[in-house]
């Protein structure tokens, strides 16, 4: 007399359709990267603007690595390339909305690269928003301090650099198909189809 096989022994093991699971970065790490970069970009931006306003006069130009790099202190009421100089308040509203939208996306955050990109974006947006809110000529109409001059290019600041860097990272992540939560839908679809 033979024993009947147990129900577990009869059923074949289910195949692993998703492949090996990659461990997701811990939430604390992602938020640390995000807030750390946001604070770094913001503080670095504000300290450099403080240095410029304390040590230079508006319109002054100092050679740093001529002819490639100069400090050239200007106050910009518009956006990049001085676009929209007469509607400063619009940029204040846009930067406020962008900052709030970034914070609302944090609950979906699942990628270190997205944490890096959004941290730089928030730090840069808040850096220029601080200028818009608290610099002359008035509240919410303030002019942004710009001082980095490269040949044949707009004069910019650290906040602008942080925003542009974040946009480049976001474009690369989007091109690679990596979503905010860290998943890669195109690769996941290929694995399930094969």
Image (cartoon, grey):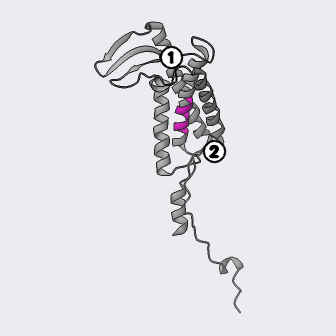
Q: Is residue 117 magenta?
A: yes
Give the image location of residue 14, x and y in percent.
61, 72
Of the numbered discs in the image, which one, if any, rests on residue 108? 2
Q: Residue at position x 40%, y 20% from top?
A: 148
Residue nearest the viewer, comparing 130 with 110: 130
Q: What is the crowding at mark 1: few (fewer than 14 residues within 10 Å), some, or many (at least 20)?
A: few
Which image quadrant: the N terminus? bottom right
53 to 128, vertically: above or below? above
Magenta region: which residues? 115-123
Foreground pick, 151 / 118: 151
Residue 83 drawn above or below residue 175: above
Nearer-N-terminus badge (1/2) = 1
Which type of secondary structure does the marked residue at label 2 adopt?
A: helix
Which numbered disc covers residue 47? 1
Dominant secondary structure (helix, strand or loop) of the stretch shown in magenta: helix
Out of 8 and 20, give the one closest to the viewer: 20
* Residue 36 seen in render: no
Q: Position of residue 105 (x, y in %)?
A: 63, 40
């Amino acid at each position: 007399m033979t024993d009947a096989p147990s129900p577990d022994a009869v059923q074949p093991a289910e195949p692993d359709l998703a492949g090996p699971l990659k461990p997701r970065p811990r939430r604390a790490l992602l938020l640390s990267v995000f807030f750390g970069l946001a604070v770094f970009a913001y503080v670095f931006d504000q300290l450099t603007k403080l240095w410029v306003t304390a040590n230079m006069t508006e319109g002054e130009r100092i050679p740093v690595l001529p002819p490639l790099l100069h400090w050239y202190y200007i106050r910009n009421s518009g956006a990049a390339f001085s676009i929209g100089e007469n509607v400063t308040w619009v940029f204040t509203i846009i930067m406020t909305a962008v900052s709030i939208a970034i914070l609302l996306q944090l609950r979906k955050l699942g990628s270190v690269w997205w944490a890096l990109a959004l941290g730089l974006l928030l730090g840069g947006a808040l850096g220029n928003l601080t200028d818009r809110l608290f610099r002359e000529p008035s509240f919410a109409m303030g002019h942004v301090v710009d001082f980095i001059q490269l040949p044949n290019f707009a004069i910019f600041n650290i906040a602008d650099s942080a925003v542009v860097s974040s946009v480049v990272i976001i474009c690369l992540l989007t091109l690679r198909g990596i979503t905010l939560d860290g998943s890669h839908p195109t690769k996941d679809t290929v694995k399930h189809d094969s």
